[in-house]
């Protein structure tokens, strides 16, 4: 298993951690799984006081995609307010179309790129879908699962960087590759793995989905 994301509860105030845990660890199997061939994630909620010796990250297995092994990097979480993009209903899109057009005319900003859901690797909020939404249902209770984590190939693209790239990561020419893809990931054709959980069930079962361009 390959470590992907580790987040402490203190750095994720908007995420409801299970009682007795303060550390979220997400790993995945780097072999291709499912119809669309993507790494299979696992979610572990842990008590950091029980963490022992830290093991080294396994070296990439020959023949497997090296860009499914994230580069070691430090996470600096920042809370943002999101609005639905692909999850916005067609009725709401029609109702808001004039306001979106006025926004673009007065500010040059597009709702979909600059003000809706945040791109990149993120906890909570809306999934950073590349294709149409595909929310899984819990196999135990049948309810729709909630989005826990998006692991994306890029932190932003050639348009969304205007509002989502942190000021401290900007350069005179725009941005650096390290800012755009600090984890060094490429999932399919610049896609993402989406992890969901059912918070209504005591054991917090997870679901997952993958899409790309």
Image (tube, grey):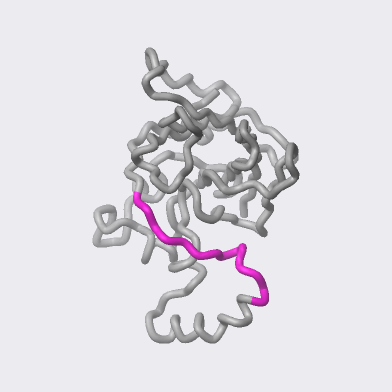
Q: Quadrant of residue 194?
A: top right
Q: Is residue 63 shown to the viewer in this render? A: yes
- Residue 89 in magenta? yes
Task: Give the main secondary structure, helix, strand or loop, of the magenta stretch.
Answer: loop
Residue at horizontal 40 percent and vertical 36 percent from the top: 7
Q: Residue 58 in the image: x percent, y percent?
A: 48, 19
Question: Viewed as shown, does residue 170 lie left or right of 113?
Answer: left
Q: Is residue 39 shown to the viewer in this render? A: no
Q: Quadrant of residue 10?
A: top left
- Residue 38 in magenta? no
Residue 200, relative to residue 96: is it above or below? Answer: above
Residue at horizontal 58 percent and vertical 30 percent from the top: 42
Stretch of the chain drawn in magenta = 78-91
Front-lying residue, 192 or 77: 77
Residue 77, relative to residue 117: is it above or below? Answer: above
Residue 127, relative to residue 94: is it above or below? Answer: above
Q: Quadrant of residue 84?
A: bottom right
């Amino acid at each position: 298993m390959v470590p992907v994301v580790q987040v402490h509860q203190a750095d994720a105030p908007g995420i409801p951690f299970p009682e007795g845990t303060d550390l979220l660890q997400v790993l995945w199997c780097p072999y291709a799984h499912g119809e669309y061939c993507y790494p299979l994630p696992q979610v572990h909620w842990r008590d950091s006081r029980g963490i022992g010796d830290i093991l080294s990250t396994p070296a990439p297995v020959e023949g497997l995609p090296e860009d499914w092994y994230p580069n070691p990097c430090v996470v600096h979480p920042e809370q943002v307010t999101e609005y639905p993009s692909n999850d916005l209903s067609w009725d709401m899109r029609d109702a808001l179309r004039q306001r979106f057009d006025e926004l673009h005319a007065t500010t040059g900003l597009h709702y979909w790129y600059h003000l809706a859901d945040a791109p990149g690797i993120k906890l909570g909020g809306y999934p950073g879908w590349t294709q149409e939404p595909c929310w899984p249902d819990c196999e135990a209770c049948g309810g729709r699962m909630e989005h826990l984590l998006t692991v994306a190939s890029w932190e932003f693209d050639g348009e969304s960087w205007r509002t989502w790239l942190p000021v401290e990561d900007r350069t005179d020419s725009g941005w650096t590759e390290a800012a755009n893809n600090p984890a060094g990931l490429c999932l399919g054709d610049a896609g993402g793995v989406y992890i969901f959980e059912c918070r209504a069930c005591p054991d917090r079962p997870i679901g997952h989905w993958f899409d790309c361009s």
